[in-house]
């Protein structure tokens, strides 16, 4: 049987999948819709910086260059680093640019046959089935389409790009009644920097949203227009943001990313002793979250400007919603070049937007919707089969059920890298790619479909418990060590990565701990 591998997307996860598949002896083809690598790092606004300290966001076998001195590198420095990685490992020859994948379709096995399988693909192995994937690819330069075949597909299309989430409003109050311009933050990020600067200059701008892209945009608009044309931010549910300096950011790793810190959290699949210990230590878990909240209220004027979240700091950590404040955000609020409004609903009118409790509209020339993306729908849309689409999104109240956050138990010969998030995505994607290549190389066999579905159900319960209404983000932020332990055990690698008892339990885990993973066996 042939073992052709197709990777869709040349962002961070796609490059990692390519690098590790080549190391395992595969000859992958990477289809990338654009003319460059880097994924979402190609679509950021001028002021965007890395949200993590660079040491926690790096490839395990490729250090940041010495000349990058900033703790939080700019988006251009991140992009240059990613390009250097691709060049260093000679990944460019495997990438077909201007190649947009329109759809994928699994052929060669009937759905009736697949329903009888006890094991994934019938055997529990990556290449066990006689089926194959047909990948329809559009050449964006010539508009010609071509169908490629592969025995295995790795989806690396991301979930925070491509399909914007636009609020649905009644016709009488939708954006069509507004005299100004409305755009999603995705459109703004896609613009050339000079064109974006020209667009916002001298405009009355309103931004709808409360997450990272919204605050970055607000600062950029405030710097362009000052108090003469203040930028108005409309937020429904503010989130916790961290200043780039101070006690909390310096000790966040010890408080949340050490093995001891994870003892305080109930983890999916843990034994009864760990469960009891997490229950006994729950007051400490609550206390650490409450300390973080009190510190941020002391450090930042959250109450003064109505930006105190109603939910806990731990909930945002568990949902991967903790962001870094852009420089001088509250300085801009203090001087009046950023105005904050809280509202649970809004509607457009001829002059701009009207929010809860106000009769007078917010006069605007430009409204930017920083309202996120439809990641689930984007992933679902790439499948031609309605059966597979239903498997992926079984209900509006479910997460996409992926075993080890990579494999769907009922979709054979396919993996998803980059859907489930963490608080430092790059190292998380890397260990998943290593795990996946061990599977593709036949080094271990997957458990039964029933066992995998039971495991995905446990993870869904865990995410709903700690992430609250944001469970759909499928974040493993506060259980990343536990999650990595499972992958290490599957690969027959030692999950304990530190030297010494105290270091193992109390030092934060990072990318360097998983370097040379395959060389360290039990």
Image: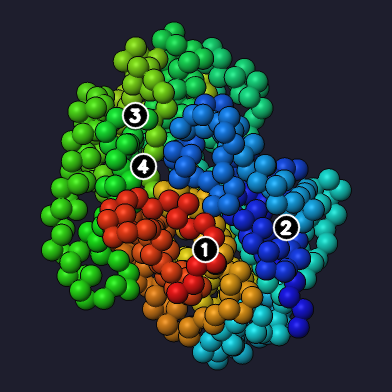
- Residue 179 visible, this orientation: no
Asked whether, in this view, residue 345 is left or right of residue 371, the answer is left
In this view, the mark in front (3 or 1): 1
Asked whether, in this view, residue 222 is left or right of residue 98, the answer is left
Q: CA distance from mark 4 to mark 1?
A: 29 Å
- Earlier residue among tags 2 and 1: 2
Circle 2 is placed at which residue position? 30
Q: Secondary structure at mark 2?
A: strand
Circle 3 is placed at which residue position? 245
- Earlier residue among tags 3 and 1: 3
Q: CA distance from mark 3 to mark 4?
A: 15 Å
In this view, the mark in front (2 or 1): 1
Give the residue drawn at x 46%, y 29%.
Answer: 216
The label number, if any, that marks residue 322 in the structure image: 4
The answer to whether 256 is drawn above or below residue 302 in the figure is below
Give the residue drawn at x 79%, y 67%.
Answer: 148
Tell me where residue 43 sits by quadrant: top right
Asked whether, in this view, residue 87 is left or right of residue 51, the answer is right
Position of residue 379 measured from the top left corner of the image (x, y, whole percent): 57, 59
**Most foreground residue, 160 or 428:** 428
The label number, if any, that marks residue 517 in the structure image: 1
């Amino acid at each position: 049987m042939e073992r052709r591998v197709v990777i869709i997307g040349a962002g961070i996860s796609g490059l990692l999948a390519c690098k590790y598949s080549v190391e395992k002896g595969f000859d992958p083809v990477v289809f990338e819709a654009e003319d460059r690598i880097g994924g979402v790092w190609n679509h950021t606004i001028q002021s965007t910086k890395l949200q993590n300290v660079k040491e926690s966001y790096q490839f395990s076998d490729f250090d940041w260059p010495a000349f990058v001195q900033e703790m939080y590198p700019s988006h251009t420095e991140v992009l240059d680093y990613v390009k250097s990685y691709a060049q260093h490992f000679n990944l460019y020859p495997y990438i077909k640019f201007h190649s947009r994948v329109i759809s994928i379709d699994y052929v060669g096995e009937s759905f009736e046959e697949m329903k009888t399988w006890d094991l994934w693909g019938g055997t529990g192995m990556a290449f066990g089935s006689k089926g194959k994937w047909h990948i329809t690819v559009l050449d964006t330069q010539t508009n010609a389409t071509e169908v490629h075949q592969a025995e295995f597909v790795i989806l690396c299309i991301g979930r925070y790009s491509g399909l914007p989430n636009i609020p649905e409003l009644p016709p009488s109050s939708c954006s069509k009644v507004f005299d100004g311009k409305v755009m999603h933050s995705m459109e703004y990020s896609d613009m050339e920097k000079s064109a974006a600067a020209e667009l916002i200059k001298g405009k009355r701008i309103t931004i709808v949203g409360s997450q990272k892209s919204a605050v970055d945009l607000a600062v950029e608009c405030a710097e362009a227009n000052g108090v003469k044309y203040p930028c108005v931010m409309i937020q429904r549910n503010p989130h916790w943001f961290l200043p780039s300096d101070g006690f909390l950011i310096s000790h966040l790793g010890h408080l949340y990313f050490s093995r001891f810190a994870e003892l305080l959290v109930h983890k999916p699949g843990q034994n009864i002793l760990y469960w009891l210990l997490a229950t006994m230590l729950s007051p400490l878990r609550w206390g650490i979250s409450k300390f973080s909240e009190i510190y941020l209220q002391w450090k930042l004027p959250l109450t003064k400007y109505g930006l105190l979240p109603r939910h806990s700091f731990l909930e945002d950590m568990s949902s991967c919603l903790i962001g870094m404040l852009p420089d001088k955000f509250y300085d801009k609020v203090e001087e009046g070049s950023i105005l904050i409004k809280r509202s649970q609903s809004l509607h457009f009118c001829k002059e701009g937007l009207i929010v809860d409790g106000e009769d007078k509209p917010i006069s605007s020339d430009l409204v930017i919707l920083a309202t996120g993306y439809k990641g689930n729908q984007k992933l679902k849309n790439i499948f031609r089969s309605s059966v597979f689409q239903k498997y992926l999104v079984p209900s509006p109240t479910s997460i996409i059920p992926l075993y080890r956050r990579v494999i769907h138990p009922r979709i054979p010969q396919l993996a998803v890298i980059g859907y489930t998030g963490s608080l430092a995505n790059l190292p998380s994607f890397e260990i998943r790619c290593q795990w996946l290549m061990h599977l593709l190389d036949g080094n271990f066999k997957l458990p039964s479909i029933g066992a995998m579905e039971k495991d995905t159900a446990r993870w869904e319960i865990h995410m709903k418990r700690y992430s609250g209404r944001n469970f759909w983000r499928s974040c493993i932020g506060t259980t990343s060590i536990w999650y990595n332990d499972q992958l290490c055990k599957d690969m027959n690698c030692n999950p304990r990565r530190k030297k010494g008892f105290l270091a193992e339990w109390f030092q934060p885990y990072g990318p360097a701990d998983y370097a040379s993973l395959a060389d360290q066996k039990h």
